[in-house]
Image: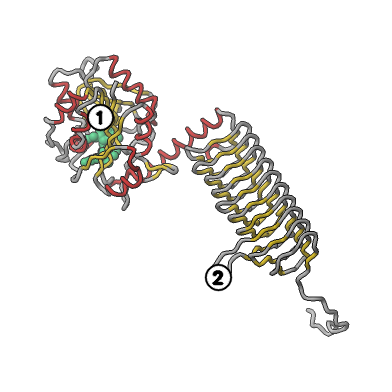
Amino acid sequence: MNIKAVILAAGKGTRMKSNKAKVLHKVFDKAIVEYPIKAAKDLGAEVCLVVGYMEDEVRTEIGDSVEYRVQTEQLGTGHAVMQAKDFITDCDLVLILYGDTPLVTVETLKNLVDYHLKHNSLGTVLSTRVSNPFGYGRIVRNGFNEFEKIVEEKDADKNQKRITEINGGMYAFNAAKLVHALDKLTNNNAQNEYYFTDVLDIISSEDGKIDAYMIQDEREILGVNSKVQLAQATAIMKERINIQHMENGVIIEDPQNTYIEPDVEIGIDTVIEPCCIIKSHTKIGNECRIGYNTKITNSILENGVDVESSVIIDSTIGHNTHLGPFAYVRPNSHIEANVKIGDFVEIKNSTIGEGTKISHLTYVGDADVGSHVNFGCGTVLVNYDGKNKYRSEIQDNVFIGCNTNLISPVTIEANSYIAAGSTITKDVPENTLAIARAKQVNKEGRAKNRKTN
Ligand code: UD1
Ligand code: CA
């Protein structure tokens, strides 16, 4: 069956109190509207987005994997769907979705379509009961408990306002019938808008069968109209994602305070301690420990990596490597297996070979470091002269004494030893001891008359 989906995303979202189009606000790393788009696509539907307010920004964010129609004036949800009439003429079944409902799942859309087909309906609206129906369209049913119409909050009388079954803003239609009903829509209501919901009334008053498919979980249909609802949507999404990981075998010690973005992958028996944020396309292996207060963005961690209170961005970490506490791994760093990166160590745009130890208070920027190198405390790769950045190489088994400056570009060849306190400006050949510090002079007795308190 040929299914198409029209998703409405033209409104400003006045209630958001924002300069940004509502549908571009983010739930984790994705714009709100990307969620219904993905759900519709996963169902196999071709998607058309109706855009208007900040049209260019929406197109830039979403790209060309969907079709677009433009609603130049925001005259209501019905008017928005009218702009996509040509898109839906040649299909069997059309889904109408709103761009501000990020919690919809493909399973729910599938159930909606199945229900619609099974009941031979011409239009089916997804409904649910909510504890607080304020702001939603109410589903009015007749004496036989059959769907009658939808009344918007602003048009509802006292009794209708008490109805707790609401319109979830997702619909399945017979395409031809929908096109026909769209031609008859008017804006005769409290807000002088073309309400999309009126097409249901139009079809049913022409003796066409309309149904409401009621779902149990009201959290599927939460519409994001305000920043409070944006936070609610994020909280629900967070819980869903965390439950999925736990079901896959990940240990999350404090799911309330763990933020994992939708595209992250984590292996079994990995422990996530409280207050961690794991973002973008990060992949974490099995049996890792992601210690409290860690933030990892778009990085790959192999099995058995142990991290504590650290930040890792756009980098890769080999198996059984230990980081932190308070390590900062900046973009394009590749740290191999069994490495130790200790406290207050910053790594940037560098490769670190297997078994190397950088235990404390060190900056490694723009360097290629071999395996089994030992960095003394307080080593600095001096990679920037105020204008240009330079790269250095430190080969296998080098030992660097504490408080060393390596002025890049410089090469320290294998098995060399840098004496503590050196400032190295020239290359060091293999197996060499390099000392680059002022000689000590002792002046006896000269400290004798020093003032003390
Ligand atoms: C709408 C429904 C309401 C339902 C609720 C579910 C109507 C008339 N009301 O109300 O019954 O309970 O959703 O969340 O449909 N949009 C446009 N062009 C417009 C107006 C809106 O593209 O001219 C888009 C918005 O960008 C938004 C979506 O349509 O993504 C829904 O509009 P919104 O104003 O949020 O409708 P609600 O008042 O929430
Ligand atoms: Ca809404």
Q: Is residue 385 left or right of residue 376?
A: left
> Where residue 40 sits: x, y (%)?
34, 30
Who's the residue at 28% across and 41% down the image? Answer: 9
Query: Looking at the picture, how far across and down is residue 164, in whole percent?
Result: 30, 28
Residue 410 versus residue 167 in the image, above or below: below
Dividing the picture into quadrants, the one containing residue 65 is top left
Alpha carbon separation for disc pair 2 and 1: 64 Å
Q: Nearer the viewer, residue 327 or 363?
A: 363
Q: Tag 1: Cα neighbours inside 10 Å, few (<14), some, or many (≥20)? A: many
Q: How crowded is mark 2: few (under 14 residues within 10 Å), some or many (20 or more)?
A: few
Q: Which of 438 and 53 is in front in this view?
A: 438
Secondary structure under badge 2?
A: loop
Quadrant containing ligand 2 reads: top left
Q: Is residue 142 left or right of residue 403?
A: left
Asked whether the viewer can see residue 136, the reply is: no
Mark number displayed over residue 386? 2
Q: Is residue 193 above or below residue 314?
A: above
Rendered residue at 56%/46% (across/down): 296
